[in-house]
Amino acid sequence: MSALSRELAFQLHEVLKVETLSQRPRYEGQTREDFDFILSAAERLSADFFAPHYAKGDAEEPQFVEGGARTIRETGEAWKAFAEAGMLSAHWDAEEGGIQLPEPVFRAAMAYFFVANTPTAGYPFLSIGAANLLREFGNDELKAQYLPAMADGRCAGTMALTEPGQGSALGDIKTVAIAAGDGTYRISGQKMFISGGDQAFTENIAHMVLARIKGAPAGVKGISLFLVPKFLPDGDAGLSGALLPRPTGHRSG
């Protein structure tokens, strides 16, 4: 057993006592053996597909070729293996295709990938976060359109938040959203530092973009979150976005 495995086992079973979660309806029937199996699978997967190309990925960084970003072959292979193992959606509800893996166990499993290859792990980790946002705040149409592809690895996800000259002042963003009259918005602006912002190993990328609806109040209270796909459902690339409501249901503007 590796040092990481020993530490995770101690934290999960001795400190957090995750087995007790099985007493809750959501995790009923799940056992320590189930949790250990997931962790063991994550360890093998990270060792086989993530760790071997850590140095190569550092030496051969992504390139912008013919209008798109290109990564080394192994990055896409790691993504495919991660997705096929069900890791992108293991913590989702059963009716969504997940196995309702408890969050502490899921995050412990993710530790293996982070340790094995932080840059490559960034692609699925960001996608998991983007999918979580969509699951929580997206409407039924958006969920039906994007979540299945984000679960099986056909679609990745990013966070498009920071802008040139913005610094840490989130309220100063200049990206603007204008309603198109059909429930979507036209997004205009510039974002930067977008990890995983482009690659060629998924069919689509769902960008979670912060923007201000035209006429919304100044400051952070006037900011909204949009899903802006690399490719629109009709197959065209564009800057059309769909609004994800605030947690309170309020829409600025």
Image: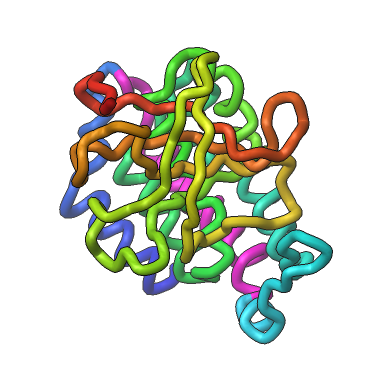
Q: Is residue 236 left or right of residue 248?
A: right
Main SS of the magenta part reads: helix
Where is residue 5? Give x, y as percent. Answer: 39, 64
Q: Residue at x 28, y 23 (%)?
A: 251
Compared with residue 69, is residue 189 higher up or lower down, i.e. above or below? above
In front: 5, or 197?
197
Compared with residue 197, is residue 134 higher up or lower down, i.e. above or below? above
Q: Residue at x 30, y 45 (%)?
A: 104
Q: Quadrant of the N terminus?
A: bottom left
- To which quarter of the image does residue 20 belong? top left
Where is residue 56? Give x, y as percent. Answer: 69, 81
Where is residue 241? Give x, y as percent. Answer: 52, 32
Where is residue 127? Give x, y as percent. Answer: 51, 46
Compared with residue 107, is residue 122 higher up or lower down, i.e. above or below? below
In front: 35, or 42?
42
Q: Quadrant of the C terminus?
A: top left
In front: 112, or 222?
222
Q: Is residue 150 left or right of residue 232?
A: left
Bounds of the magenta span?
A: 26-53
Q: Residue at x 52, y 44 (%)?
A: 207
